[in-house]
Image: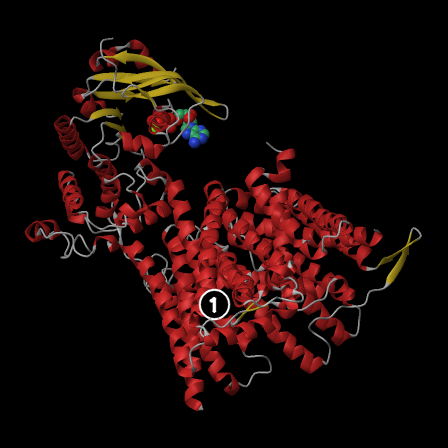
Amino acid sequence: MLDVLVGALVYSNLLALLAIGLSLMLLTCRVSNFAHGDVVTTGLYAAYTASVLLRVSPYACIPFALLAGGLVSLLSFLLVFDPLRRAGGGPVTLMVASMAVGIIIRYSLHAYADVMQRTLGVYTRQFVLSDFELQLAGLRVPGVLPLSSLTAAVLLVSLYVLLYRTRLGVAMRAAIENPQLAESLGIDVKRVFAIGWFLSGALAGAAGVFLPFRVISDPDVGWSMLLPAFASVVVGGIGSLAGSVAGAYVVGFSELLLSYLLATLGVSTAYRPLISFAAIVATLLLRPKGLSSLWSR
Amino acid sequence: MRGVEVLSFLVSTAVLYSVYLILASSMEIEYGELGLPSFAKAAFFALGAFAVGALTVRLGALLTGVALEGEFKLVSYRYATLISASVARNPALGLALFAVPLLVALPLAVLMGLAASYPALRLREDHLAIALIAFSESVRVVARNYEPLVGGTFGAGVVDFLAWLRSPWKELALLAVALAMGFGAWLVEYRISTSPLGRVLRAVRDDEVAAQAYGKDVARLRAQILALGSAMAAVAGVLYAFYAGTVNPDDFTVSRTFIVVLMVVVGGRGNPFGPPVGAAVYLLLDRGITLVKHYIPVPFDVNYLSYILMGLLLILLLLKRPGGIVPERPLLTLRRALPQRGSAAAPQQRGAEGGGPAGT
Amino acid sequence: MSRSPLFLAKNVSKRFGGVRALNGVTISVERGSLTLLMGPNGSGKTTFIQVASGLLAPEEGRLFFEGRDITPYPPHLRFKLGITSTFQTPRLFPSLSVIENVLLAAQGDRGFLGSLRGDEEEVVERAFEVLRTLSLDGVWDRPASALSGGQMKLLELARALVSEPKLLLLDEPLAGVNPALAGEIMSRLTKACRELGVTVLMVEHRLDIALKHADHAYVMHNGSVIAQGAPEEVVENPEVARAYLGE
Ligand SMILES: Nc1ncnc2c1ncn2[C@@H]1O[C@H](COP(=O)(O)OP(=O)(O)OP(=O)(O)O)[C@@H](O)[C@H]1O
Ligand SMILES: [Mg+2]
């Protein structure tokens, strides 16, 4: 049971890091970004590569993941989503474009994994990384628990401070609210959005660092987190940043706890993804505003 | 021996082309014409394939009086071979095993398509797309874990329904069946696109509210188009399963849907020639890379390159030529009513022509 | 009341959040008449037209057409009964050509198989006639998105006319059309409607043009009908003047 709770918390931390980025990209470009899972994988391989080269723990390589994820996301904004948005592409067109971006990133990582395996001589597919253990209040917990919680907390609080306590944040929220008006007030909307996309990607990249400590990893692993992350956004209420963080913990804990409960009834845990898929469909149809309807009307 | 290899390469390319032509035609009607992102395409495609995977071995065993022993996932391939041997002596059995899955899958697909039109009326288009993708992945997750269906991750064997034919004839027969289905589906799409119905679909896509105000029953139209599109995808699934000789749930991922969307967008949304062009471009890239892969010196699996190129192609087209290779044209639906064109003079010319309805 | 009106809206209310766009509005339209609906900006005229066409559902009140209660009818069924409405800002089908826009409105819902058939010679003829009436025949093959603002207005009107409705609900058909043409259109419109026996309910600000053709007029203000009667009398009504002056 402790394992389940630990797993749920770590998983939710990572979902939160993804979901808030997804929300930010939805708000800035109206795109449901299907490439965001692959940005996670980019962070994963960046940190993994750095840790092999520098012979340090992958945890020490989080900055590389932040940078790699941020850059990939920024590039996709500058080269694809911003031009498409300006050309008047609708949300579905942008979504299709994001799938293409995701495919490009994912298969580039596949190619990279081949190259990395050859040149660095380490496993780059179907691998897990071994974690250290920690005594916490008399319980033995894996290091990924405190570290992912700390990372998520630090990054989410920093993002909050940035958005709500700095001029850049004011500019970004103004640009989201009304790009034309913001532009006429002298805000460089493109630059502000670009920063938002970099930050979204950086958070996703950071999430990637923790994945190999929990699940068997390969270049597809980030993609498999995408729909649960969308579930977090939807459950939290599309368009609400705080909602997507709350949604991440709701979805993360429901997935693990429910599948644990069902497993005690003899249902295979392999059906676990169905929980977040069902959450997407049910929330959209029954309560389109999700959790955010609890605090805003 | 080279001749046989070339033949089988050509046949398999043509069959795959037909499969994709059906899928792309259905996506063109739903997404290109009606503007409805039916991104559960992979699930409906899977439905047809699952019908084949779940039924041919079981039904074949029933009809030939063989008792199935052992877990389905472990024995389906063995029995598939066994029953194929019976088909070799009994063409009627082969035809029955081809027809029954089709007849089972079609009504199921229609029902599921109608069910999918329920959220289609209530959700914004991008939310609908996400919901359908979630649904599609749910189908896959269930299929890969519920082993009695099509053997879970083991997959299921498929009876060779053409086992009664000998080598070049067998391939040619499969080719004929595939091309007939592929071009049949495309003709359906062409007919819809160029008829007044196509005009109505594009009107709903352009402005749903205005279409309602001018008397179109948008809800009914969506349900009908989704039912049709889903049935077409299921037909593609049946064909694909018989072609592949095996059914594996993990073949029906979101990427499959994406590739079909890619064909429609690359070919040209709203143009009936979009699907054949888009499917051809995709296969040229995919097969082309398979053909030359031994000559490309890269330190990784060359197949990854074809995916990357495909993604780049799509993005470049969206940016530089959003209408696709053959963009949509207005006046499409007037071909038959207006044989003579030419701007202002046309009404008068028409008066002079005065002919009855062409075509039909 | 000896004979029932063609169209009757009884006590209709519609709210947008806190805004009461319609507040117990009762409007009746006599068969064969041209009824004018006036009122300052934001008084609820467009809302009323959309409630009448079925695009908006009222919270209260009932709508009758030829004596039948059509309140629960969706827009396409109202169209089928013979009610056609236009939009204040044209909502064309931009990727269709001008003639296709008109053809689309010329027929109701012919069903899936019905509209697969291409036999529309007669309808095409009718569509071109309407385009000629509105001087749009020169641009028949352009995509609707390529039209000028005034032409878009005319195309919106063409779509409405071609459907040959019993009741035509027009939302400011003359706004944005140049004055010379506007007078011309109004004359043609009233002539066509008289000939075809079309009843018209028209929202219009340009009283100079519209008033002389109208048989009856309603004035709305803040979601309520504040005056009705013969057009000339209504415009003389002091309360109407006050509403327009904004008090
Ligand atoms: N979709 C909507 N959502 C919220 N409020 C609306 C909506 N449509 C109309 N309103 C409000 O309802 C009121 C009536 O609007 P309506 O458009 O019916 O006025 P109108 O008489 O047609 O004005 P105009 O002469 O400017 O066209 C206005 O206060 C308007 O702001
Ligand atoms: Mg108005």
Q: Quadrant of residue C166?
A: top left
For the N terminus of chain C, which image quadrant?
top left
Location of residue B66 in the rendering, given as x and y in whole percent from the top left corner: 58, 68
B88 to B6, vertically: above or below: above
Taking B197 as reference, is C230 above or below it? Answer: above
Along the line of sight, which residue is nearer the eye, B342 or C146? B342
Q: Which residue is mark 1?
A: B240
Q: Where is residue B221? Give x, y as percent.
A: 37, 44
What's the residue type where badge 1 is placed? Tyr
Output the chain of dot 1: B
- What's the colour scheme? secondary structure
Can you see residue A239? Answer: no
- Secondary structure at numbered mark 1: helix
Instruction: Name the residue nearer the viewer: B220 or B125.
Output: B220
Where residue B89 sits in the image (x, y, percent)? 46, 76
Q: Nearer the viewer, residue C179 or B165?
A: B165
Disc 1 residue lies near ligand 1 with CB under 8 A: no
Neighbour class for label 1 at 10 Å: few (<14), some, many (≥20)?
Answer: many
The C terminus of chain C lies in which quarter of the figure? Answer: top left
